[in-house]
Amino acid sequence: MNAYDQHMQSIYKQMREDLVQVGFKELTTEEDVQETMGNLEGTALIVVNSICGCAAGQARPAVREALNEVQFKPDHLFTVFAGQDREATEKMREYFPEVPPSSPSIALWKDGALAYFIPREQIEISQMETIKTQLTEVLEQFIVQ
């Protein structure tokens, strides 16, 4: 790995850890996504992570805070990193064919289908608190134990 790649990996590391630290499993290859989604039961919160400011300032903090606020959490937490794990991201997006590619974005998967989707367009024009509230309401609506 050259010096540039090493430097960039060090920058992305914290962006990845923001979600991993709260229980998200990174899916970094096309095979990871296919195996995970092909055998998935229950509910999953899926974050298409990215390096942009709206991911750092709005999406990731909103996801973390929403998960702290809800009583019942999804059965699974997954993330793919757009721009870094391209094949994994492209494969994940195949599971949401009804929505255009968007990163960052937040998807709720339930009963083998996309139940809710927050695209970049909504994330970048909203405050973190607004996204957190929206996601909290969605999780409370769809995650019942």
Image: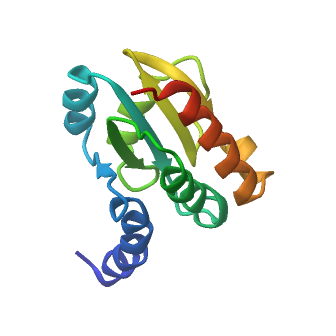
Horizontal placement of 114 versus 88: left or right?
A: right
Q: Nearer the viewer, residue 84 or 130?
A: 130
Q: Quadrant of residue 94?
A: top left
**Residue at image point 36% right, 79% down:** 10
Horizontal placement of 30 versus 44: left or right?
A: left
- In x, y percent, where is residue 124? 74, 52
- In x, y percent, where is residue 33? 27, 34
Q: Is residue 4 above or below residue 37?
A: below
Horizontal placement of 96 versus 85: left or right?
A: right
Q: Nearer the viewer, residue 91 or 38?
A: 38
Q: Nearer the viewer, residue 44 or 68?
A: 68
Q: Quadrant of residue 29?
A: top left
Horizontal placement of 5 versus 101: left or right?
A: left
Q: Is residue 39 above or below residue 137?
A: above
- In x, y percent, where is residue 89? 40, 40
**Residue at image point 60% right, 43% down:** 136
Which quarter of the rendering shows the N terminus? Answer: bottom left
**Residue at image point 32% right, 23% down:** 42
Which quarter of the rendering shows the C terminus? Answer: top left
Q: Residue furthest right?
A: 125
- Look at the image and name its color scheme: rainbow
- In x, y percent, where is residue 4? 37, 80
